Amino acid sequence: MTSRLIPAFLALLLSMVFSGGMISSAWAARAKPAKPVELPVTVESLLTQAHDAIGKGDADLAVRLAQSAIVADPARPSSYVALGDIYAQAGQPDYARSFYDEALGIDPAEPNALKAIATLDRDHPEHTARATQ
């Protein structure tokens, strides 16, 4: 007789847990909140966040994130290009050019820096004349 009551009791117990009865409330009170997953901070993640910030119009945050990427890996020209892009989008071509030049100092064939400087030369010819003097 007892062996027949155990499955019925378990079924009742499980139905109370999953239906929001008193047992599930007690379990919820004892449950520990899940810890947020901490992803490692990488240069790529910093640059992605910088790109997202500039897309949302937060140029100050974008600059800080791109600067952090440079600090994390100062030998990576793409970080300098990203910071140059942020300054170019913010209407500061002189700052943009200085970071593109830094990227070219690391890799003289950096295609994104070369393309960005060509765009600056086309869009801001007044800054080109000063840069070559």
Image (cartoon, rainbow, N blue to C red):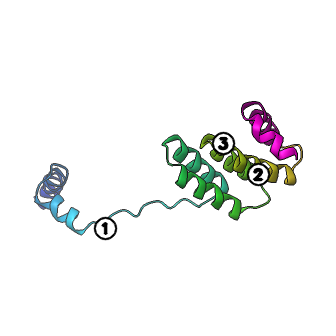
Question: Where's residue 13, x and y in %?
Answer: 15, 56
Which quadrant would residue 124 be assigned to in this image? Answer: top right
86 in relation to 6, above or below: above
Is residue 48 rendered magenta in the image?
no
Question: Where's residue 22, x and y in %?
Answer: 11, 60
Compare marks 2 and 3 and give the one earlier in the sequence. 3
Circles 1, 3 touching at the beta carbon (< 8 Å)? no
Give the amino acid at mark 3: Ala
Q: Count neighbours of disc 3 (C-alpha within 10 A) and say few if under 14, some if 14 to 19, many if 20 or more.
A: some
- Is 83 on the left-hand or right-hand side of 28? right
Residue lying furthest top in this view?
A: 122
Compare marks 1 and 2 and give the one earlier in the sequence. 1
Q: Residue 88 has which mark?
A: 3
Marks 1 and 2, how far apart at CA:
51 Å
- Is 131 on the left-hand or right-hand side of 93? right
Give the amino acid at mark 2: Ser
Which residue corresponds to mark 1? Answer: 32
Q: Main secondary structure of the magenta part?
A: helix
Extent of the magenta region: 111-133
Secondary structure type for disc 2: helix
Which quadrant would residue 10 be assigned to in this image? Answer: bottom left
Marks 1 and 3, how far apart at CA:
47 Å
Q: Count neighbours of disc 1 (C-alpha within 10 A) and say few if under 14, some if 14 to 19, many if 20 or more.
A: few
Secondary structure type for disc 1: loop
Which residue corresponds to mark 2? Answer: 98
Is residue 118 rendered magenta in the image?
yes
